Amino acid sequence: MTVLVNGDTKVEPTETFSVNLSAASGASIADNQRQGTIVDDDAAALPSLSMNLVAHADGHAGMTAFTFPAAPEPCR
């Protein structure tokens, strides 16, 4: 017996299913139920942030602020 499982890239919990056998023809059924487990193999995408390079003179006295433009990256 083959049970087809559709693959995807969605992160989801482990799933279980049952197979029930009945009405055998020409044989007897010793154990009529079995459980299958579908283990998710898709890793959760972590959010990331990209930052542009910045160049700025340090000045001659005091503090100089460096501002780094940043943008969130979409999860993959």
Image (spheres, helix red, strand yellow):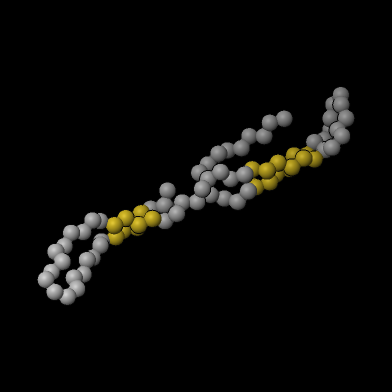
The N terminus sits in image quarter = top right
Quadrant assignment, res 20: top right
* Observer-nearest of 57 and 29: 57
Res. 12 in view: yes
- 35 w.r.t. 53: above or below: above
* Observer-nearest of 58 and 73: 58
From the top left corner, tell me how far across and down residue 68 is, in percent.
Answer: 25, 62
Q: Residue at 67% of width from left, 34% of height from top?
A: 3
From the top left corner, tell me how far across and down residue 31 is, in percent.
Answer: 84, 37
Quadrant assignment, res 27: top right
The residue positioned farthest toward the front in the image shown: 60
Quadrant assignment, res 26: top right
From the top left corner, tell me how far across and down residue 5 is, in percent.
Answer: 61, 37
From the top left corner, tell me how far across and down residue 42 is, in percent.
Answer: 53, 45
- 32 w.r.t. 75: above or below: above
* Horizontal side of residue 51 vs 63, given as left or right: right
- 25 w.r.t. 64: above or below: above
Q: Total marks drawn? A: 0
* Horizontal side of residue 12 vs 55, given as left or right: right
The residue positioned farthest toward the left in the image shown: 60
Q: Residue at 25% of width from left, 56% of height from top?
A: 52
* Horizontal side of residue 29 vs 55, given as left or right: right
* Horizontal side of residue 10 vs 38, given as left or right: left
Res. 10 in view: no
The residue positioned farthest toward the bottom in the image shown: 62
Q: Residue at 13% of width from left, 69% of height from top?
A: 59
The residue positioned farthest toward the top in the image shown: 26
